[in-house]
Amino acid sequence: MGNACCIPTCSCASETEQLLLEGPLRKRVINGPGCVCVPAFTRATVRSGVLLDESQYAHIRNDLHGEISSVRGPHLYFPGAYEMVLERLTVISLSRDEWARVQNKTTGQRRVEVGEQKVYLEPMESLMDRGKGYLIDEHHAVLAKDTSTAELKLVVKQGMYIPGPFDDVIQVQEKLLLEEYEVCILKDPSGRFSFYHGSNERERSFFVPPFWSLVQLRWSNPVVVSRVAMDTTPPPTHKMVSRFDLRPSFMNYEFIARTTDNVELAISITFFWRIIDVEAMILKTADTPGDICTHARSIIIQAVAGYKLLDFLSAFNAIVTKHILQSGDRFYNERGVELLNVEVMKFHCVDKNTDRVLQEIIQETTERLKALEKQRSENEVEEARIAGEIAVEQNKSQLEMLRIKAAVEQEAANAELVDLKKGHEKRHAIIEGGAEAGKIMAFVEGMGERASDQVKMELYHMLRRLDAIKAVSGGNATLYYTPNDVNLSIESLAQSRAHSD
């Protein structure tokens, strides 16, 4: 900065500088490069220009009328004689899924700018916040609050959601998808419960409405709670449950009971149970597993107190099952649950010396059972061997019986076949005899009364012999007949013809 002088002077400025000349009556600027002769009583000040690149802009105030304007880069800006640079700012670059919320500090008005673009703040504006948009699809929604009206709204329209000028996003909400066996509970603004069942197609998927809340129950961990009861160090732990599974499930529980002969036992029990009525459950209890185990603990302590140690050892599972399943049905039904089964998994004496004796008893009992089981196995093996031999003999006997039966059936079939052949031969002989008799009768009747019956028969037999001789002579075989076989003579033939005449 120069000083006013009563005599003229010379001042110079480069390309990026300017001279501010302040005289008695006015101010003026001369932009470089160059040199200027400064008049008398005038102060000359060299000041740099405002160099702005593409990502910058500046706010300029005019001191004469108070107006504020903006200058955007890229640009080398030289302020006027009465102008002053208030601030140099960086442009707000928004990508496609980004937004920026801007507020006017004078009027309080807000506006939201959405990318993809460059945002320049006006002189009286400030950046409130910026962020990315929220992608809404079938399984996601946005719960937002309008700060101007305090109204909550659930935005489910699919696409990119950009908050409005007065919108605050509270959370991105996932759609609840229930399985067939699940139930959940919603509480409306008035405190009433609504039950949603996965088995109902219209209720199995939904968004939690504004001012509604998903009901969560704090269920205790029975194993940890029971260990606390046994003076161990781990603190009780819990789990938050909002989806209630209607399928059968199990849980383990440990507690201490005392027999009538004053032996302290630590008993571990497994409960098999299921929820049958969620509405009854939530109206009666906030800790279903804790209620089941506490109630069962009371019953078992009373039951064990009525038995001596050895009596309890002989039938511990039957004792526990009998007392729990038969005495607590109403208690469980009132809480909307069903106790399916109870099993004693293990137990031991709290006192180490007593537990050592107990283990010896158990070991001895185990050895005895092992011996009995071994003997039983050997007996079963011997029985199986004898049964196998009996089966083999029975099979042999059955095979022999089948063979004899088959032979008898074959003989019967052969006899039947012989009878059939004999019948056929008899019928054939009858037919041939009938035919031969017919021929004889025809021959005899043809000769009439001209010859006696004896002559007729002799003549017939002689003709049959001639036929036989012709049949034999027609072949290649040689056959010899005796005179008695033929019994032919010219005399007999002549006599036969004479009789026939």
Image (spheres, grey):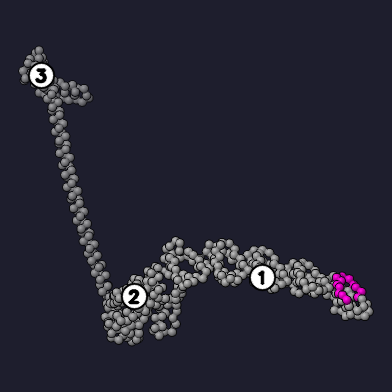
Q: Position of residue 4 (x, y in %)?
A: 89, 80
Which residue appears at 16% of the width and 38% of the height? 420
Position of residue 140 relative to residue 326, above or below, is: above
The answer to which of 232 and 293 lies nearer the viewer is: 293
- Foreground tag (1 vs 2): 1
Type of the residue with mark 2: Phe
Q: Residue at label 2?
A: 331
State how many labels appear: 3
Q: Residue at label 3?
A: 445
Residue bounds of the magenta highlight:
25-38
How far apart in space, not on screen, are marks 1 and 2 (Cα)? 63 Å
Q: Residues within 10 Å of mark 2 (few under 14, many from 20)?
A: some
Magenta span main SS: strand
Q: Position of residue 143 (x, y in %)?
A: 55, 68
- Is residue 31 located in the magenta-colored stretch of the structure? yes
Type of the residue with mark 1: Gln
